[in-house]
Image (cartoon, coloured by chain):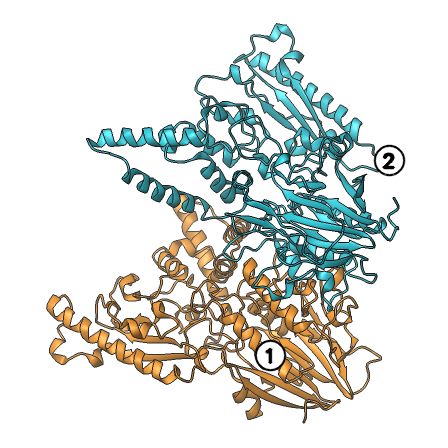
Chain colours: A orange, B cyan
């Protein structure tokens, strides 16, 4: 297929641009914007008909003025201009554009006669730029109201979700574009189970064969627990849908899925790494989707501006002379060990750099390097002394070394040993985890997932009232529940009955095996019985 | 002059719209937006060539997403459309449009071929939407980058300010529009004194007679102290300037100034009352300025959407039966007094409502009522018991009564008596005042105006680092100053010498008579020796 074919619709697909990520970092501050520009350049060069984004355009639900204006400036440059797109909108009724209180963004921007749109952009919102407040505005609405973007897939009724398509035509090719902005995964999972998510039929009058594309922004994979509903299985989605664009998942899986033919899912992955994990270390891509009739073709296009991320795991023990095996609390030995460790670090960083960074070619940028260090049995290993010249060649000099202790060798009291965290900053989640772990009684009343959600709102979305509101809700619910129980007897008896009641309730909503499973996507407010290292960030926070 | 005359330039002038003011108030939340719409409607109806705003378009330097989007929506509706303005831009070089990092807002919006601008808006920024951060962005730049507004008069060099004109022509009429966004008053005052504020000549090639208009956003009046430079005298401004549009001052003085012929100043006043003071209670207006050659005409246009503000002062003592004069700590008397007071309140509120609110006419909206109560000698007067039916007819039911004690009758310890503040909320300024008053030594090192500025940034502009930065600056300056002094002797001697030095320094920068004068425009970090009631908000915060 040729993109210039008048019957071929060509769409650039990208997701999770996370604009503003690390905007104040002197090395990486421009990364997200540079890649955004690159994506627009690719769209421009390939003469696509429009751009489709899968959510998390912004990293924060309340972006700084600097991030907002830089973004609007980029959109103004690439979206406006002469040479209108060749696509035609047949119907867009109910497709959840705009917002009742904002009269100027009722329809698609390229139908607005006051602005010249050369590159239409359609986007759903993600969890990072989710709908907020009484008006349900998303950060991406700054772009909508400026006429730079078409925000669709807005659903505010969480009892039933009707997804209306935007009907787009180019020549003989007809596309029904369905979208659903981020909804809490568990809730959406339940709605699907209850058959309350309805893909609406194409309107009468818009006859003929339609290619059905659906874009969503949710957890895609079950991460091990059979009980959780914290993801959306692919087979929940109507069989009618020809192709599903999956946002939110940061790993680029373009090749794996569509080439295998086993899946309808196109998972482009984020265009920037927002964590130093394996899933983010694959080469980042966007995709060009070409549709002609009911055939389609996917062309992955590698992003050149993205920093390479190199991850290496080392087990310190393997590098230490057996002579020093009696190592703890022996200052002379410690000094030698420290020296050896730094040598290992330097060697590993050097090798990582050489694999990813070629100064002469000047093609790729300073890499991100993460060295995961199994320091089991070692105490107070410092990262001081790493070669400064090497650090200058790395984009994340202050967070290269990530020391993790092996679980089964941890001391019994399970305290977070901040010296072990070394150059990794201690984060709020760890603190909450530690606090709640030692105060199990305190969490009996709470359903951990409620607290989880509130904590996420508080920490990542700067919603100062989230925890207070959660507590108030839980408390008043609890009082009502207790009123219905027979709580006669002494104060102690009442207390123990009440605790038993709440414990029982929470077991129902969160089976114990989940809390103890290898669960890496829950913020640490569940009552783990052993500390398994600092929890990785919840996947939905990507 | 007729506005339809092809040689007459017609400009709608408004200032201090404070969009988003009390946006969460269920009665007044829409006020600022309603008046903004009214202003655009007036511009539209009168077919003006453009709108000129004098700053403080937004109430907060970081407006909420709701305020931003509502504002952009209004601008999109009224600024874009068919029927381009008949004005022509001859030169705009150096007029401080846009921002080097935002390529898309380099010139005026109606020269941008990608958008159809029917109503150009020119605006400087005020102190409320001042330039912030390393990028010097103002909240109004959200509108600039969307192509809805031309932000000019941006000056970031505080050693010398060059003001370049925007040269605008309509038929034979030529306007040189000079603008200067908000600069700290004292600094600007000094720059004027040092002849460092330079109105640049009109560029070569733009020949002929020019009408020179200057818009600024500063304190206009000297508020009593001969020493302060916290305002800009009118005569500082070049004689060449034909007319000065003065933003920031909330009182509408259109009639007073231009009709008298004594002043070149046009002071339209704010389009919304952001305090319940006399200056805000005058009827609010915008003005239409018509220029033809070097003649001009001003047409004040009253704003219909603005709530009337009625202020009444009562002295409680005058209403109390002499029989009850031994009133304090006599519970029986107190009850009778309380009853009488409530009767007085009800009567006064009723009278205020009848003067401003005519339900049948339904023309004006629920009024703002402020009753200033001199409660000297009375203790614990409550506002409970005011007729609920009356409160329903008032737009500010929770802040009607403002009790103030007469200074000379205050108890000796000068504590803030929160019972006296009654329904007036205790604010941060009062607390700081109280704290510093009892800790005079602590403020010796600081120049109160520096602390003032930092406090303003912290409290009103949500700048979390303002106070820390101020302290760091003062401390390092102090250390340098001390190094130059001879500080031999004991610790006590050093301390007393140092204190004497700083006291002396502060006297120079802020004469004691200022602090004791009837100064109502300084946040309470000066060391008043007597407490004069809760300080009113600093004028520059209007």
Camera-side residue of B279 and A152:
B279
Q: Residue at x 61, y 77 (%)?
A: A40
Per the image, label 2 sits on a secondary structure element best described as loop
- Residue A502 point in image, percent of width and height: 46, 56
In the picture, measured across the screen, residue B382 lies left or right of residue B17, that is left
**Which mark is in front, 1 or 2?**
1
Q: Residue at x 47, y 76 (%)?
A: A223
Label 1 CA crowd tier, 10 Å (few <14, some 14–19, many 20+): few
Which residue sits furthest bottom?
A1
Which residue sits furthest top?
B323
In the picture, measured across the screen, residue B426 lies left or right of residue A150, that is left
Residue picked out by circle 2:
B361
- Residue A195 point in image, percent of width and height: 66, 74
Camera-side residue of A415 and B179:
B179
* Circles 1 and 2 on the same chain: no
Residue picked out by circle 1:
A41
The relative height of residue A100 versus residue B273 in the rendered view (above or below) is below
Q: Quadrant of the N terminus of chain B?
A: top right
- Residue A464 point in image, percent of width and height: 51, 52
How far is disc 1 from disc 2 in space, using C-alphas?
Answer: 60 Å
The relative height of residue A359 versus residue B322 in the rendered view (above or below) is below
């Amino acid at each position: 297929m040729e993109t210039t074919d008048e019957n071929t619709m060509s769409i650039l697909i990208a997701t999770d641009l996370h604009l503003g990520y690390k905007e104040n970092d002197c090395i990486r501050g421009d990364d997200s914007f540079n890649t955004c520009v690159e994506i627009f350049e690719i769209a421009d060069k390939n003469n696509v008909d429009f751009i489709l984004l899968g959510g998390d355009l912004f990293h924060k639900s309340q972006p700084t003025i600097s991030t907002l204006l830089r973004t609007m400036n980029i959109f103004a440059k690439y979206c406006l201009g002469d040479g209108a797109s060749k696509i035609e909108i047949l119907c867009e009724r109910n497709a959840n554009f705009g917002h009742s209180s904002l009269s100027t963004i009722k329809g698609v921007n390229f139908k607005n006669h006051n602005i010249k749109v050369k590159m239409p952009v359609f986007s759903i919102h993600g969890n990072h730029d989710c709908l907020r407040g009484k008006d349900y505005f998303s950060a991406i609405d700054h772009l909508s109201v400026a006429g730079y973007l078409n925000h669709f897939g807005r659903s505010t009724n969480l009892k039933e979700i009707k997804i209306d398509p935007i009907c787009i035509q180019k020549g003989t090719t007809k596309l029904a574009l369905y979208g659903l902005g981020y909804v809490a995964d568990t809730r959406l999972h339940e709605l699907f189970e209850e058959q309350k998510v309805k893909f609406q039929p194409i309107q009468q009058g818009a006859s003929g064969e339609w290619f059905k594309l659906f874009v969503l922004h949710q957890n895609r994979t079950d991460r091990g627990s059979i009980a959780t509903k914290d993801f959306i299985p692919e087979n929940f989605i109507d069989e009618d849908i020809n192709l599903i664009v999956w946002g939110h998942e940061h790993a680029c899986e373009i090749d794996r899925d569509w080439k295998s033919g086993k899946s309808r899912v196109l998972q482009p992955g984020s265009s920037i790494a927002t964590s130093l994990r394996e899933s983010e270390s694959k080469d980042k891509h966007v995709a060009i989707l070409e549709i002609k009739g009911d055939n389609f073709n996917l062309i992955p296009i590698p992003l050149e501006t993205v920093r390479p991320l190199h991850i290496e795991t080392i087990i310190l023990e393997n590098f230490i002379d057996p002579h020093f095996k009696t190592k703890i609390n022996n200052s002379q030995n410690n000094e030698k060990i420290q020296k050896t460790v730094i040598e290992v670090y330097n060697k590993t960083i050097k090798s990582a750099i050489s694999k990813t960074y070629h100064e002469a070619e000047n093609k790729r940028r300073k890499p991100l390097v993460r060295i995961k260090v199994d320091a089991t049995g070692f105490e107070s290993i410092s990262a001081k002394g790493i070669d400064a010249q090497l650090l200058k060649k790395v984009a994340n000099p202050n967070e290269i070394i990530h020391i993790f202790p092996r679980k089964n060798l941890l001391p019994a009291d399970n305290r977070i040993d901040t010296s072990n965290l070394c150059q990794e900053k201690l984060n709020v989640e760890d603190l909450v985890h530690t606090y709640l772990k030692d105060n199990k009684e305190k969490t009996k009343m709470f359903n951990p997932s409620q607290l989880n959600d509130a904590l996420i709102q508080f920490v990542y979305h700067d919603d100062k009232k989230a925890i207070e509101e959660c507590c108030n809700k839980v408390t008043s619910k609890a009082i009502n529940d207790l009123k219905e129980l027979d709580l006669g007897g002494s104060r102690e008896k009442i207390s123990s009955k009440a605790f038993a009641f709440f414990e029982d309730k929470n077991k129902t909503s969160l089976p114990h095996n989940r809390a103890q499973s290898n669960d890496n996507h829950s913020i640490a407010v569940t009552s783990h019985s052993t500390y398994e290292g600092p929890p990785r960030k919840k996947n939905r926070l990507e």
